[in-house]
Amino acid sequence: MSEITPDLVRHLASLARILVTDQEVEQLAGELGVIVDSVATVTKAVSGDVAATSHPIPMANVYREDVILPSLTQLQALSSAPDSTDGRFKVNAILDED
Amino acid sequence: MAKEQLMSYEDAIERFEVVIGLEVHVELNTVSKMFCGCANNFGSEPNTNVCPTCLGLPGSLPAVNRKAVESSIAIGLALDCQIASNGRFARKNYFYPDLAKNFQTSQFDEPIAFEGEISIELETGEVFMVPIERAHMEEDAGKLTHVGGATGRIQGAEYSLVDYNRAGVPLVEIVTKPIYGALDKAPELAATYVRAIRDIVKSMNVSDAKMERGNVRCDANVSLREKGAEKLGTRTETKNVNSLKSIENTVRYEIRRQAFILASGGKIIQETRHWHEDRGHTSAGRPKSDADDYRYFPEPDLVPVQPSQEWIEEIRQTLSEKPALRRKRLQAAWGFADLEFRDVLNSDLLDEIEATVSAGASPQSARKWWTGELARLANAQQVAVQDLPITPEQVASIQSLIDSGELTDRIARDVVAGVLAGEGEPAEVIESRGLKIVTDEGALIAAIDKALASQPDVMEKIRDGKLQAAGAVIGAVMQEMRGQADAARVRELILERAK
Amino acid sequence: MTEITSSSAAVLAGLISSKQVSSVEITTAFLDRLEKLNPKTNSYLYFNRENSLAQAKKADQQLADGTAVSPLHGVPIAVKDNLTTTDAPTTAGSKILEGWVPQYDATVVRKLREASMPILGKTNLDEFAMGSSTEFSAYGPSKNPWDLTRIPGGSGGGSSSAIAGHLAPLAIGSDTGGSIRFPAAMTGSVGAKPTYGAVSRYGLIALASSLDQIGPVTNSVMDAAMLQDVIAGHDPHDSTSLPDSLGSMVQSVKEADVKGLRVGVIRQLSSDGFQPGVKACFDDTIEKLAAAGAEIIEVDCPSFEYAVAAYYLILPAEASSNLAKFDSVRFGLRVTPEGNPTIEDVMAATREQGFGPEVKRRIILGTYALSSGYYDAYYGSAQKVRTLIQQDLAKAFTQADVLLTPTAPTTAFKIGEKVDDPLAMYLNDVATIPANLAGIPGISVPNGLASEDGLPSGVQILAPAMQDGQMYRVASIVEKLYTDQWGASLIARVPDLEAL
Ligand SMILES: [Zn+2]
């Protein structure tokens, strides 16, 4: 049976910064449990040294030269911000120091 | 906050072994940012050096700055690191409002440089090899300003403002392995190490290396263990310590704080802390927890960095001499005693003295000017000696006039004063102030005779072999000549007359 | 339906360049139709007649000035709403982006503008392209023009229904696990996913960066080839975009010749799990190709068994990170809870209300797959499966020039039928996912109507990476076998929307 407990869902949701109600936690635990049981078959597919593929078409060393390209104006940058002041994005106070 | 209790430093060192680890972030001075073409500029209007990529707008993608990679490789080489044949970027996932994408594009298990070392020489001449674990590329975050609340600090702030100009500025993070055996020297070693890193990146011109601007920032890890214990103690990490003095103070403070806790049977909490220079202590930040699960994975929007051997060698060729080697070379060439040389290093005058010497002055005279008269004048004016409006070439030309006997040391100081006062080149100051030395022997002899006349017993004493008696006459002659005479020549003339 | 709106893009381009019909006339015809019929299909989330016509006018002017450059000059197009456009809101089908007007154009959009192709509007999709039915769009599902009670496929169901309903002659889609090809199969249209990196992803709101690829949704293989030629090419903004051109797809279509062609049939994707009518259509395609002279070879891809599982680990993992930027700070929705909330509270509330259930499911699944202690088992293993799939394909492509599969296991299902069963929904992409994991090109071409429900079926043609030309060549052969039989394209048989 699945290892997706309600506590784990709560923890994952907090890592992902998504507020979840207790009811959602229960529901997600159930749904994710089924999905995880199904996708966990990948662990059986591979044995020994198979290289991991993180990029479908192997490429390397793609660089841009160190030159300045046009930036947005301050007005453009802030144009879709929910809130801004003094040329900066405005957000609620931050919880903890770090 | 209750004041934390501390053990005396001496007792702490007596009882515990100190292990430190240092993470230094170096902001590169590329023209553009790490992953986009926005200007890498300090002090621009907020949110004017931003684009879809560094603002993390939906759909935007990063593209790696070649020069940033080159600078990172150069730093790796300067620290005697190996350069990875396959370095990849990874995403470090965590939410914070100064992080536009809510992940930092960094390197995780495949850093560009790894396994290096750097030798650090302490005040006493003791040399430590500091082992470097890795140097990796990453991007800086934006800048938060906390508004409201009593102190303008994060606690009690009403809201915060974000400027993303700094977001995406290229950083190289240099991480040491745990450093053992520094004993009571751990705080000094930490600061000296950071200074060495700063000097290296500055001399290579890959960073502006201004600590006060945050171009070089240090996180200091400190842990203690009972002497003889195998197991490492729990460490704390003090973040963003941004001056050499603070680094030393931070490490010293953490040693004393942790020693008190351990000695009284307490446990060290693994946490990030903050140094408050004004108050002279660190304070607890966030405890480390599984909330620090950064879920690193290879950055799928970028391809691997696989520097060719040719490229690495090309970069190696352009490397400027390592500061440590340069210091060794110059001390030997100049023949300075250890103490003399340390004085030069502590006043950060290596460049000035080297330039003065290459303009023709002897090393000792160059040293005396910069660490002596010029340092004194700078101190009086409360400016850095390097910022005095006099060039090494001007110092060398004044010294050459002393060497040829055209100026005395005293007159030379007047010339320097004139140059500093903006009266022009040394020759012009000499001309306008009438500072030429008096070489007319007739005038000198007349002055000597006048002085001897008022001190008739002097000749007698000299003839009796009490040569020091000439001093009084020399003084009088120099006064008569308003200092513009060569005292050595005056002495010779007096002794001749006594024969 | 006018003659204009039922014509292929190639025909319309010819009419424009020969100045028989203007871009304004053609654009107007499509705007008239979509304004009338979009309420039935919900294909478009946004359209703006004035703006589209201004672009058409400009195209006509250039033609008059003799400065037209593109083969599709003046032909209007619909763009999936996960591509940024400076002149139209871009929502990605999500509430969290409602009303956002991007500060920049996606590279593909810029190329369309440079080719003077008027943009008709932005088409519907499952939220952030997570789905295969458009039922997960925050703005309601699109409907299949063949049967308005059925899904048009997803995530690009807005584009596929626009094509099948003749609400656009051309459309842009994006394909992460089948989001172009599956909807094409559901609607009897043509949908192509080029080789990974052939088309720039800059400005495509990322779902899974290592799988996403933009491609054409059209009425015909030639139209798709023409559109790929316009949108493909290296982009310095996208480090994963291919450095070299893959050549002209139109040229490949023109060279179509069945002689000596070796067609591979994948054992793992040709038997179990397919609706009988779909399977019958597929067998018919293979028979037709054999009759035309192609050599049919059965190939073995054993690791395909794990493709869906690997995909549903890699995709959520990458998506969980890509979607972290939706935090209410720089753009998009902000939900401020009661009381004295911190920014952390605001972010969490915004993401709770701004994201739909499927998006949240996948973000949390992806967060799990990447979290410490699980990474190696899940994300790590999934990436190894990717390698195995590439190895299987490399071997298969030594035996065959192209591989054929049914595009989808079934024909279009009823709206609501699978919406509460994530696993059942995920299996829609069983045949399309391997191409994304391996980065190879794939195209869906209509191959008949399933006997049991009379709904379209599609055949998928896969070619080796970078051999998009080969894919188009064979697609054109298959298409011709059917148009020769039917005397027209399948899409000509779509019911009259105006009467529905
Ligand atoms: Zn930028």
Image (cartoon, rainbow, N blue to C red):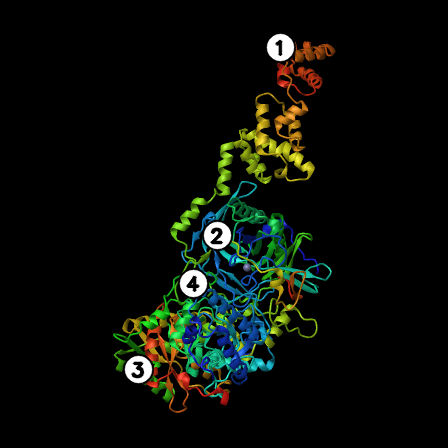
Closer to the observer: label 2 or label 1?
2
- Residue topped by disc 2: B67
Closer to the observer: label 4 or label 1?
4
Asked whether C103 or C224 is in front, the reply is: C224
Mark 2 vs mark 3: tell me if same chain: no
Ligand 1, seen in the image, is in the quarter at: bottom right
Is there a contact, CB below 8 Å, between mark 2 and mark 4? no
In the displayed structure, B332 sits above or below C11; it is above
In the displayed structure, C294 sits above or below B162; it is below
Mark 3 burial class by Cα count in 10 Å: few <14, some 14-19, many 20+? many
Q: Which residue type does callout 4 highlight?
A: His
- Helix, strand or loop at label 2? It is helix
Numbered disc total: 4
Is there a contact, CB below 8 Å, between mark 2 and mark 1? no
Label 2 vs 1, first from the N-terminus = 2
Asked whether B404 or A64 is in front, the reply is: A64
Mark 4 burial class by Cα count in 10 Å: few <14, some 14-19, many 20+? some
Instruction: State how far apart marks 2 and 3 are (Cα).
Output: 54 Å
- Residue topped by disc 1: B496
Q: Chain of mark 4?
A: C
Residue B476 visible in the current orientation: yes
Quarter-wise, where is residue B103 in the image?
bottom right
- Helix, strand or loop at label 1? It is helix
Q: Is mark 4 within 8 Å of ligand 1?
A: no
Q: Which residue type does callout 2 highlight?
A: Lys
- Residue topped by disc 3: C286
Q: Which residue type does callout 3 highlight?
A: Ile
Query: Could you say where residue C6 lies in the image, as x and y percent from the top left?
Result: 44, 81
- Helix, strand or loop at label 3? It is helix
Asked whether B456 or B104 is in front, the reply is: B104
- Residue topped by disc 4: C234
